[in-house]
Image (cartoon, rainbow, N blue to C red):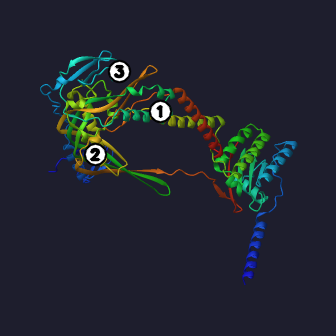
Amino acid sequence: MRKIVLIFLLAVIFLMASVSYVFANNDRHLPLLVDDADLLTDSEEELLNAKLESISSKHKCEVAIVTVDSLNGEDPQDYADDFFDYNGYGYGINDDGILLLISMEYSDWHITTHGYAIKAFTDAGLDYLSGEFLPYLSDGDFNGAFTRYADLCDELLTMARNGSPYDGKVPMAFTTRILISLGVGIVIALIVTGIMRAQLKSVRFQPAAESYIKKNSFNASVSRDLFLYSKVDRRAKPKNTSSTTHTSSSGRTHGGKGGKF
Amino acid sequence: MAELLEYKCPACGGAINFDSRTQKMKCPYCDTEFDLETLKALDEGLKEEFTDEMVWETQAGSEWQEGEAEHINTYVCKSCGGEIVGDENTAATKCPFCDNPVVMMGKLSGVLRPDYVIPFKLDKKAAIEGLKKHLKGKTLLPKIFKDENRIEEIKGIYVPFWLFNADADANIRYKATRVRSWSDSNYNYTETSYYSVWRAGSVGYERVPVDGSTKMPDDMMESIEPFNFGDAVDFQTAYLAGYLADKYDVNADESIDRANERIRRSTEQIFASTVKGYTSVIPESTSIRLRNGKAKYALYPVWLLNTVWNGKRYTFAMNGQTGKFVGDLPLDKAAYWRWFGGLTAACGIITFLITFLLGL
């Protein structure tokens, strides 16, 4: 009886796994770099595509770039989400991936994230990322912008893999670290040597006369505590940083950020 | 006709009027609301306060009996001007304050007879041991300082003290707050409650000592306190045998301020210790009045050593009754900087590694 239950359970697990595999892993039929707006030369395209491939397989999270001439009146966010979903982007059964969409018509850009990439690219991470590549876009240096984007995706994914997704806190610079260490060292040294110096000093005034209080002579005849008023101060709790998400037309959850360049 | 009531707002000091329409006391300046009863009680409390009064009766000491002072010699130091007295059988040769030769002046005159004396309980051997112990375990004390000390020169000397007895009446008002915090999903709340706290009562003081000699540094004499008055006896010249005594040059009246200061501070402390359960307590008004203030004159036993090292004078004193040993010591500057540099480097490196490991 127990055996049958076990076999049944295994069968159910196997079935569920394969079903989700079929649902999720609709294979990508486009390269990671789709340059429909033809912003890059062929050699640039080839190099960048190879770079994206290597980053994607290294982190098991696809990093993609799509350029188009026009969004055909669609919202950049919807367009990016749908492009990602319906073209089968994303790595593994959860379709982990990030996609940067550039539309030349109204200078739109949008980044969409899905699966693991939502966690890896926090709101702060997306701010940092876009802040870094947008100046290149505005200058019309598309190859520079995409290379910077790819490098930063690599960097942020590495941080996320190490357990601490970028949260807006810039790692300390080497000199700051040295200065802080030195400061802590000096403070501790001052305290310890201060204690040592204090051992040498034993002459000081007695501030009070508590040793001369007559035994049992203390008598507090009046002891009154009167409540006057009270004030309540209310402060909003600080919002914790995370990744904001929305649902795309296909019903899947995406994160992202967009704007104009 | 309604009674016109006007109070001062305890929060901001503005005038509050009773608003007969709302039947409430509300400060028009800071919008704080009060119970009428609270303000009435506060007002009554304020009326009870009195002004400070610290009056003493300073008939300390007494006249010498016929012929008693004839057996006491006085000496004066030509170098520092210090005057000491000694039993006629005790020949003083060196000044205990500056180590220079002293000259005999003659018979004692012009000073009062002490009321009490606490005889020496610890001998010279104990004093030498005390000094050795005092120099031990001090990391930054120059090594050679220990070796160069002329430990044998340590001298027993009776130091004149004025002793002040008094009962202190106090009436103290504090402003106290109690803080309570809680939070819900969106907000953190802090509630601060303000209280007016009164304490009044009395506390008695017995024989608060004030050093009556300018030759003995006041801070040093306070450092070897307390003396246990239980061992005190009525003064007899016989107790001076073998020891020197310092002649007082600050009289009781001039010493009162210091006694008042210490009594006042102690009284404030003991009343403040009864104000419990508050986050902050700030005294708003303190009135202290002394009753039965009386002063006495006593000689207390002190072992004293003066030594010069690297051109600087170092004085050590030991309580001749309890053995409490004090005296500031010189600092080995080279050792200090070695320690400082070493600790800075060691702690700096550890901090650096920690920040690195924590990925800060």
Report the amino acid beneath label 2.
Phe
For the residues tagged 2 and 1, is the chain the same? no
In the current view of this chain or complex, which residue is farthest to the bottom?
A1
Q: Give the Cα distance between marks 3 and 2.
A: 43 Å
Q: How would you rate the neighbour count of disc 2 (Cα within 10 Å): few for under 14, some for 14-19, many for 20 or more?
A: many
Report the amino acid beneath label 1.
Arg
Q: Nearer the viewer, residue B199 or B137?
A: B137
- Is residue A96 visible in the rendered image? The answer is yes
Q: Whole-percent x and y of residue B28?
A: 30, 45
Question: How many discs appear?
Answer: 3
Name the disc covering residue B98, or none. Answer: 3
Subunit bearing disc 2: B
- Is residue A170 visible in the rendered image? The answer is no
Q: Residue at x 78, y 39 (%)?
A: A144
- Marks 2, 1: nearer the viewer: 1
Q: Give the Cα distance between marks 2 and 1.
A: 34 Å
Mark closer to the chain start, 3 or 2: 3
Subunit bearing disc 3: B
Q: Which residue is mark 1?
A: A197
- In the image, is B213 to the left or to the right of B323? left
B168 w.r.t. B211: above or below: below
For the residues tagged 3 and 2, is the chain the same? yes
- In the image, is B203 to the left or to the right of A179? left
Instruction: Label 3: state its secondary structure.
Output: loop
Q: Residue at x 29, y 35 (%)?
A: B120
| Tag 3 and tag 1, C-beta contact below 8 Å | no
Instruction: Label 1: state its secondary structure.
Output: helix
Q: Whole-percent x and y of residue B62?
A: 15, 30
Q: Give the Cα distance between marks 3 and 1.
A: 26 Å
- Marks 3, 2: nearer the viewer: 3
Q: Which residue is mark 2?
A: B271
